[in-house]
Amino acid sequence: MKLKNKTIIVTGASSGIGEATAKTLAKAGANLVITARRTDRLNELKASIEKAGGRALVVTADVTSKKDWKKVIDETHKTFGKVDSLVNNAGLMPLSFVENLKTDEWDKMVDVNIKGVLNGVASVIPDMKETKSGHIINISSVAGRKIMPAGAVYCATKYAVRALSEGIRLEMGPKYNTKVTAIEPGFVDTELTNTITDEDVQEMMSQFEDLTPLQAQDIADSIYYALTQPEHSSVNEILIRPTNQD
Ligand code: NDP
C-alpha cells in the first residue's frame, strides 16, 4: 500500500492505459479521481475499484474545458482534500497523411493532446506549490522521439508533451520539490487506433500486425514505478516498447 491516502487524478480513465492505471494505483491504496467524457465507463471502473476495496471519485470532464477542470479540482478538494498527483493521460491519435487535409483532426489533437495536458498542469500547480511533494505524469509516446509517416501532427503533440514535461520539471523541481515524469510507450493494445479515419493509414497500420503489443497494464506498471520511488528520486522519462518493435 505504497500510495496509501495519496490523491491521484487520472484523465482518460474510461479505457486503455488510464483505466489500467486507475485500478493499479487504487490497489496500492491511493484515492483515485477518475475523469473522461464517458460517464458510464467511469462508473463501471469505480464499481470495480470499490469491489477490490479501493476508493474512487468519478468526475465527468472534457480535458479541453477549463470549466470542467475547475469542477474536477473542486470535487477532488471536497472529497479527498488536496491533490498529490496527476496522470495526464487523455489523448487521441487520428493519424492521417498531411495531403489529405484532415485539418479538423489536427485541431482536435492539438486541443486534447497539448492544451488538455496544459489545462491539467495549470489546475494542479496551486496544490503542488503548497504541498511541495506533487508529481505530474504526462503520457507522451515513442512518437515523441521518432516521427512516422501520417504522424506529423500526432508526433508534434507528443514531442510537445516531452518538452513541456522537461520545462515544468526544471522550474517546479528545484523550487517546489515537484516530480515530473514523461511516459513514452510504443504500441499498446488499446482503443486508440479507433480514432483513425484516413483510409490510407489503415493500410499502413498493417505493418504493426506482427508486433506483440504492450498491454495497458505494462504502462500502468511503469506509472506505478515512477510514483513509488523515494522522495529524493525523480524519474523523468520512461521509454517502453514492445520487444519486437523497431
Ligand atoms: P484509449 O483510446 O483507450 O484512451 C484514450 C482516453 O482518452 C479515453 O479514456 C478517452 O475517454 C480519453 N479522452 C479522449 N479525448 C478526451 C477529451 N476531450 N476529454 C477527456 N478525455 C478524453 O487509448 P490509450 O489508452 O492507448 O491512450 C492513452 C494515452 O496513451 C494517450 O495520450 C495516447 O496518445 C497515449 N499513447 C498510447 C499508445 C498506444 O499505442 N495505445 C502509445 C503511446 C502513447 P472518453 O472518450 O471517455 O473521453
Image (cartoon, rainbow, N blue to C red):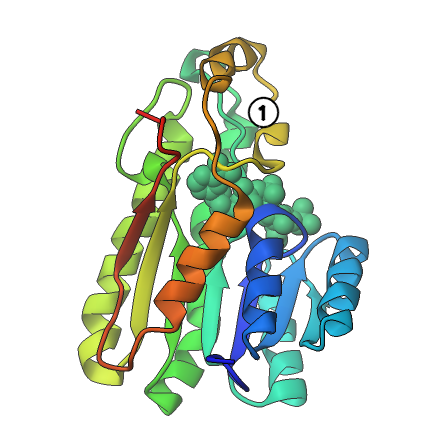
Residue at left offset 53%, top offset 74% = 8
Res. 112 visible in picture: no
> Up-down: is 188 above or below 207?
below
Which quarter of the frame holds ligand 1? top right
Would residue 78 be found to the left or right of residue 44 on screen?
A: left
Q: From the image, tell me which residue sits under label 1.
A: 196
For the C terminus, give its image quadrant: top left
Measured as percent of width and height from the top left, residue 145 is found at 26, 37
Tag count in the figure? Answer: 1
> Up-down: is 33 above or below 241?
below
Residue at left offset 72%, top offset 71% = 52
- Nearer to us in this view, 146 or 66: 146
Residue at left offset 36%, top offset 52% = 183
Going by the numbered disc 1, the residue's amino acid type is Ile
Tag 1: Cα neighbours inside 10 Å, few (<14), some, or many (≥20)? some
> Up-down: is 119 above or below 4?
above
User: Helix, strand, or loop for circle 1?
Assistant: loop
> Up-down: is 134 above or below 243?
below
